[in-house]
Structures are given as structure tokens and as C-alpha cells.
């Protein structure tokens, strides 16, 4: 099959879809009708049956040269599907799928025990999803994990969770119980750096872990000491590691990675890692990209997320440009001039009401913390009030 040419696919009926796949694209995405067509190759009503066999004669360049090895094709390598047709599971029994991301739009029970899917991702939204798992190199569950239940687990090498957490909640996020996964050895879990903090105590249900990778806002880190078999630990994008046990707490630990983590604990971890390397043989380990607290705020807490349209684009562009300028500033007068310039930009924008004014004020407060010199918050508030027309 030649790329950059129109493909006729009998996806839902005879020649139902015409698509043009760019050269080098190894994936095929099926979105739900009503979604942004620019983000998917095709849009299909979620309850329509899908004819997965329409891909049986589609090949990658390698597959075309070795067609005898791929009697049912080998393209696409990756699928992304928002819909309710589970026939791809049976199809995978004869045609290996390298990676499949599925987001069912209705309550569903799916049996993957005989499937041949290397990397399986389940995206949970509002509907209940019941899973019987087969053999997978990698299983990822993302979104509203409370909607997912696993009644049977096959052989899963690595489990990943990407839960949907509240953006600004002080309550901790508790990972739901997944009893069928209690024996897993490798776990990767990601939450937002400034979102609802993940309660690490809820990870103790996986008591046999030897490899753990964490990313984002974390709490109750002291509980990790209870993982007695831990050999590898990685922590990324973490703004608060105050409760993390010392590295020597894990007698079997031979690899630690700390990347984009808060500065004060990061310096201690760097020293601990150096000492640990003198006491035992380590595999690849490093502590790098140590960050001040304000870095997490300006990277992940920009207060214009709820803005829309032209105002949002101008606000974000102005914020980032101001941030860049302030990193080089050495005097208070320079800081004042730049922040006043920032605030005045919004005098020219329409529909700046109370909520938007508060967002701009929060942005001013964030930006004052960027320069090396300390600028009082009340002083910045006065500058803000003096120049704003909103």
C-alpha cells in the first residue's frame, strides 16, 4: 500500500471511508462522531460494527517485503479507538496488534484472555468497564479508574496507571483496589505535578513490586519503605519529596532516577546516591534537573487554563514572554517595568471580568518569584492596581 494516496476502507460498510495516511504514520485512529475530526483519521458512531478485517491487506514497508510472514497485514501497528465494538479482540487472535488504545463509550465486559495485543491501554470515562486480561507486555489504565474492574489477570509484564485527578484539590487521590493485579512486579503511575496528590499508601496493595516509577504530585511517600523487594525506583516531575525515605531503606535497590524533582530533597538524594554507589553495585542511576518550587508553578500552574479564544492565546503568549524576560533581571526597577508591561496588555482585551482579573493577579504573583531578587507580594499588588483598567 502506498502512503500519501487515498485509501478506500470498508470500515463500517463497503468502501465506507476514504482516508489519506501521511508517509511514515504507523497508527490509525477512530474517533467518535462529534469529536474534532482533525485529531482522528476517521469518525464513526460508537455503536457501529467495525470491520477490522478491512486492514488485512494493509502493510508497512517491512511487511510488504515480507508479506508471507504477515498473512493478515501488519499496518496499522497502533490503533486508537473511541467506540464500543470489541471485535478487534478476536481479530487479534490471527493478526498480532502491537498497541491498542480503547475508550469504550458504554458499559462493557471484554475478554482479552485469547487476544494477541502487546500493549493495551484502556481509557475509562463515564461507563463501567469489566476486563478479563490475557498476556500483555504492557497494560495501561487511564482516566476514571473507579469505573474499571479486573476479574481475571493473565501474564502482564508492566502495569501503568494514569488516573484523572482533580486539578486543584487538597484531598489525596486513592488508587482503587485492583485485587487481580496484586502480584505485579513492575508499576508505573503518573499524576499531574500540581494536581490532586497521589496517596502512596494506596500503592501498598502491590506488595511484590520490584520496580516502581512515579511521576507528579505525591504524598505519604514514607509508605514506600514497606516495599521490601524494590530494586528500581524512579521519581519524576515531583514538587514535594519531603517524606521520601532515604535510599538505603531499600536493601535491594540498585537503580534510582530522580528527574525534574524539587531542589532541596534532590540535593540530599544526589548525596545518598553517591554514597550508595560506594556500598553496592548500581545499575543506571541519576539525580538531575533539580527544580525550585516556582518552576512547577510556571510550568504546570499557569492560571489561564480556563480562558478561551483569542484572549487565551494572548494571555499565554504574554505570560511566557514575560517569564523569559524576568529570568535575566537583576534590579527591582526592571522587575516593576516588566510586570507593569505585562498587566497593561490586558487593558486592551475585551471581557476581562472578576474571574479573569483574579487570574491575571495570580499570574503577577507567580512572575514576581522568577527573578533572583525577592519582590514583596503586596508591592506587586499595588503595581497591578495602579495600571489596570479592568
Image (cartoon, rainbow, N blue to C red):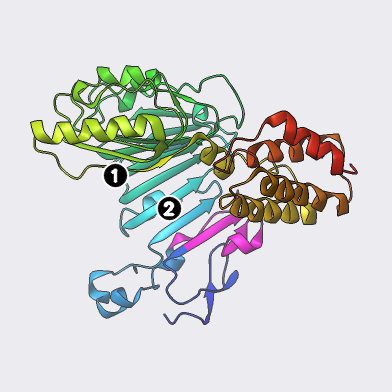
Q: Is residue 184 left or right of residue 200?
A: left
Disc 2 residue crowd, few under 14, some 14–19, many 20+, Cα 10 Å: some
Query: Residue at 51% across / 49% down in the picture?
Result: 85
**Residue 86 visible:** no
Residue 109 spot, x, y in % from top left = 46, 35
**Where 269 sits versus 13, above or below?**
above
Q: Earlier in the sequence, mark 2 or mark 1?
A: 2
Which residue occupies the foreground of this view, 230 or 316?
316
Which residue occupies the foreground of this view, 300 or 125?
300
Residue 252 spot, x, y in % from top left = 14, 28
Magenta residues, start to end = 28-52
Query: Residue at 58% across / 61% down in the picture?
Result: 40
Instruction: Judge whether residue 30 is colored magenta.
Output: yes
**SS class of the residue under badge 1?**
strand
The label number, if any, that marks residue 136 in the structure image: 1
The label number, if any, that marks residue 88 in the structure image: 2
CB-based contact (under 8 Å), mark 2 and mark 1:
no
Question: Total marks drawn?
Answer: 2
Residue 121 spot, x, y in % from top left = 42, 45
Query: Residue at 23% across / 27% down in the picture?
Result: 247
The label number, if any, that marks residue 285 in the structure image: none
**SS class of the residue under badge 2?**
helix
Instruction: Judge whether residue 47 is colored magenta.
Output: yes
Q: Is residue 134 left or right of residue 376?
A: left
Q: CA distance from mark 2 to mark 1?
A: 15 Å
Image quadrant where one finds the N terminus: bottom left
Residue 7 spot, x, y in % from top left = 52, 77
Amino acid at each position: 500500500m502506498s502512503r500519501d494516496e487515498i485509501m478506500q476502507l470498508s470500515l463500517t460498510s463497503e468502501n465506507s471511508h476514504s482516508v489519506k495516511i501521511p508517509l511514515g504514520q504507523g497508527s490509525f485512529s477512530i474517533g467518535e462522531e462529534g469529536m474534532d475530526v482533525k485529531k482522528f483519521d476517521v469518525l464513526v458512531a460508537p455503536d457501529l460494527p467495525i470491520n477490522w478485517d478491512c486492514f488485512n491487506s494493509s502493510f508497512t514497508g517491512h511487511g510488504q517485503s515480507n508479506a508471507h510472514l504477515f498473512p493478515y497485514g501488519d499496518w496499522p501497528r497502533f490503533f486508537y479507538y473511541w467506540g464500543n465494538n470489541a471485535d478487534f479482540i478476536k481479530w487479534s487472535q490471527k493478526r498480532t496488534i502491537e498497541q491498542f488504545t480503547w475508550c469504550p463509550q458504554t458499559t462493557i465486559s471484554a475478554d482479552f484472555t485469547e487476544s494477541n495485543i502487546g500493549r493495551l491501554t484502556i481509557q475509562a470515562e463515564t461507563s463501567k468497564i469489566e476486563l478479563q486480561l490475557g498476556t500483555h507486555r504492557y497494560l495501561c489504565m487511564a482516566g476514571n479508574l473507579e469505573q474499571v474492574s479486573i476479574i481475571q489477570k493473565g501474564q502482564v509484564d508492566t502495569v501503568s496507571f494514569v488516573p484523572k485527578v482533580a486539578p486543584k484539590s487538597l484531598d489525596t487521590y486513592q488508587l482503587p483496589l485492583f485485587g487481580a493485579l496484586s502480584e505485579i512486579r513492575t508499576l508505573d503511575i503518573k499524576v499531574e505535578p500540581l494536581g490532586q496528590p497521589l496517596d502512596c499508601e494506596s500503592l501498598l496493595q502491590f506488595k511484590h513490586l520490584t520496580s516502581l516509577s512515579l511521576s507528579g504530585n505525591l504524598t505519604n511517600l514514607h509508605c514506600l519503605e514497606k516495599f521490601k523487594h524494590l530494586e528500581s525506583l524512579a521519581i519524576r516531575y515531583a514538587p514535594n519529596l519531603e517524606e521520601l525515605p532515604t535510599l538505603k531503606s531499600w536493601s535491594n535497590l540498585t537503580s534510582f532516577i530522580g528527574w525534574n524533582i524539587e531542589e532541596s530533597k534532590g540535593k540530599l538524594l544526589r548525596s545518598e546516591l553517591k554514597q550508595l554507589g560506594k556500598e553496592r553495585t548500581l545499575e543506571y542511576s541519576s539525580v538531575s534537573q533539580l527544580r525550585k518550587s516556582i518552576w512547577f508553578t510556571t510550568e504546570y500552574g499557569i492560571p489561564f487554563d480556563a480562558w478561551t479564544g483569542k484572549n487565551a492565546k494572548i494571555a499565554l503568549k504574554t505570560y511566557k514572554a514575560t517569564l523569559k524576560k524576568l529570568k535575566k533581571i537583576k534590579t527591582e526597577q526592571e522587575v516593576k517595568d516588566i510586570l507593569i508591561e505585562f498587566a497593561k496588555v490586558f487593558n486592551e482585551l475585551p471581557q476581562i471580568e472578576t474571574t479573569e482579573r483574579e487570574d491575571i493577579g495570580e499570574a503577577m504573583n507567580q512572575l514576581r518569584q522568577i527573578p533572583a531578587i525577592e519582590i514583596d507580594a503586596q508591592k506587586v499588588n499595588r503595581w497591578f492596581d495602579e495600571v489596570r483598567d479592568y
